[in-house]
Amino acid sequence: MAGKKIVCLGAGSSYFAGALPDIFVMQGLSGSDVILYDIDRERAEIMAAHGRRLADLAGTAMTVRACHSLSEAVDGADFAVSAIGGSGPSKGTVYGSSVHLADIQIPARYGVRQIVGDTGGPAGMMMGLRSVPVYLEICREMEKRCPDVVLINHSNPMAILCRAMLKHTGLRNIVGICHGVQHGLAHAARILEVAPHELDAVWVGTNHYYWFIRLRYRGQDVYPELMRRVAERVPQRGSEMAAKLSLIYGFQVVYPDDAHVIEFYPFLSQGSSPEDVPYGMAEAHRSALRPDEHVQEAQAQSRAEQLDSFQQELGQIELPEGPSDPTTGEGLGVLIESIALGRRHVHIVNIPNLGCVPNLPDHAVLELEGVTDSVGVRGVNAGEAPLALAGLLQKRIAWQEMVVDAAVKGERNLVVQATLLDEMAIRPERAEAMVDELLAASKDYLPQFQ
């Protein structure tokens, strides 16, 4: 088959250090052209050199080059992979950047004590407000130059970004990939003492929060056994909250990472001091309030030193023996190859619901099983969400929609409304003051609000 054009957007991001080799080892993509685009041209060039080194080792005859024009980069693209933080030229990741640090520090002064801050809460909202316009600008160029492109997004807030592109552009093949469900499958497999590939699982949820609805092993229902073992075991540090909620609901919370799960609950806005952050996460919150030491060291370096360090880090990465497994990893290479070859293959993806979970809105971006074909990914029916989960997700989906609209329209009042709808809501007067501080801290990345 003829090779494909695969464009990597935000190519200076550290994500592509591992994502590129995952593509290069795919024999079904042999002869493809991999184009790297980033507003930080020097990082894109360094990543391109890293890519060429590994592509040569892979022997799949792929070409790799950096492109400094967005229009040229996306022109005729078959696939696009995005990792864009919405905070200006990349330092490798948005986490630890000055704007994301403000997303954590400002709400903390109002009693909202976040940990990760990339899915819900004020920080997740601000990441969306900054990133949505960037994504829409790219999509509008794609509408003209590659309208049938399959765009695979890796950035957070996942559901907000995917929904914004689907709602406000003509592109239809928007797919998000993450690893939360995969971690949950591995977690359940460890408890049951089986291999993740042997579990037949069905789950319902949006990115970073889901419940197992069905769990079978070699044709047998093992859900009761899983819940029995969850009740008897001492939960691992960092998953105490997920374990407690699972026992209360009677359904296993899939993603065992409490730092993500807690963004779907009001607990981070409760309590009178940072010490009141529950489930052993007080120190994680204090760490989130401080500039990351690695980021501080990088900022203290000259530009030349930063680029040299980046180059050295990439030089230590070796070509993997094979692609990442879609059941235990993100499976980026396998996903692209499956669509490129028109091969039916099951993946874990963030796509519009479209009836897969009948009691949730069709437009909602859920993390589902999806089947590939030559035009993209179609969701697999999961059945109805249990009532408690449906209620929780309905509110989260409405919040996601409000953040999308606020990001597009640039209306402060919509931001305040979204803040009040969020689980971490505070009193209206304080919410308005907090929003004004947050918008001011990110004003350089929020032209729609000017």
Image (cartoon, rainbow, N blue to C red):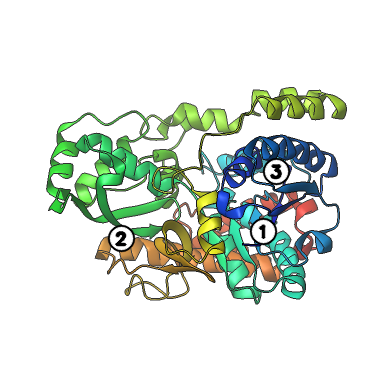
Check if mark 2's residue and mark 1's residue have beta carbons within 8 Å: no
Q: Quadrant of residue 347?
A: bottom left
First along the sequence among labels 3 and 2: 3
Which numbered disc covers residue 3? 1
- The mark found on residue 389 in the picture is 2
Q: Position of residue 425 (x, y in %)?
A: 48, 55
Classed neighbour count for the residue bearing mark 2: other residues with Cα under 10 Å, few (<14), some (14–19), many (≥20): some
- From this view, report whether residue 449 is shown above or below residue 285: below
Q: Is residue 67 above or below residue 187?
A: below
Q: Is residue 100 visible?
A: yes
Q: Secondary structure at mark 3?
A: helix
Mark linked to residue 99: 3
Q: Nearer the viewer, mark 2 or mark 1?
A: 1
Where residue 430 appears, x then y in whole percent? 57, 53
In the image, taking residue 194 as reference, residue 59 lies left or right, namely right
Of the residues shown, which amino acid type is indicated by label 1? Gly
Left or right placement of residue 431 versus residue 84 in this view: left
| Contact? badges 3 and 2 (CB < 8 Å) | no
Mark nearest the camera among 3 and 1 is: 1
Q: Residue at x 57, y 62 (%)?
A: 340
Q: Is residue 35 left or right of residue 249?
A: right
